[in-house]
Image (tube, grey):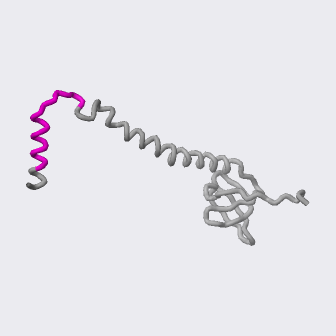
Amino acid sequence: MSFLDNMTWLVAATTATGTGQQGGPAGPVWVQFVPFIFLFLIMYVLLIRPQQKKAREHDELLKQLKIGDKVATNSGIIGVIVGMKDNKVSVRSADTKLEMLKGAISEVLAEKSTSDS
């Protein structure tokens, strides 16, 4: 017997019994969506929520930038902010002045305190 014959036989056998259940063998229709809801909740907790939290923290970091902060960019450039306009910042790194978007700044580097000695 081929696969198609087996499937035809299976369909004929299940329809011939006629159990009369409206919800089918798995119960009510909404029960079939429970695994999908469960997977969505897992994805939300493990992926979506942490990403949103990180984005909020980055936005807060960008709002608190000020002239004189030592920063690192996404590309690895380290410099000091010397100017700010709307969504752009001017960063001095060594002898070079760079103008870049605020979003390119990944972190503010902490200065070592001289009062530790």
Viewer can see residue 74:
yes
Q: Nearer the viewer, residue 11 or 89?
A: 11
* Residue 81 is at least partly visible in this image: no
Q: Is residue 27 above or below residue 79?
A: above
Q: Splitting the image into 4 quarters, where does residue 28 fall?
A: top left
The picture places residue 6, in percent across and down from the top left corner, at 11, 49
Outermost residue to the bottom: 95
Q: Quadrant of the C terminus?
A: bottom right
Percent position (x, y) of residue 46?
51, 47
Location of residue 29 (image quadrant): top left
Q: Is residue 1 magenta?
A: no
| Above/below status of 10 relative to 91 | above
Q: Is residue 59 above or below residue 21?
A: below
- Residue at 85% x, 58% y: name it: 113
Magenta segment's dominant SS is: helix
Residue at 64%, 47% in the rendered image: 57
- Total marks shown come to 0
Horizontal side, residue 1 vs residue 46: left or right: left
The span picked out in magenta is 6-23
Place of residue 51 in the rendered image (x, y in percent of width and height, measured from the top left)? 55, 49
Classify the position of the N terminus by image quarter: bottom left
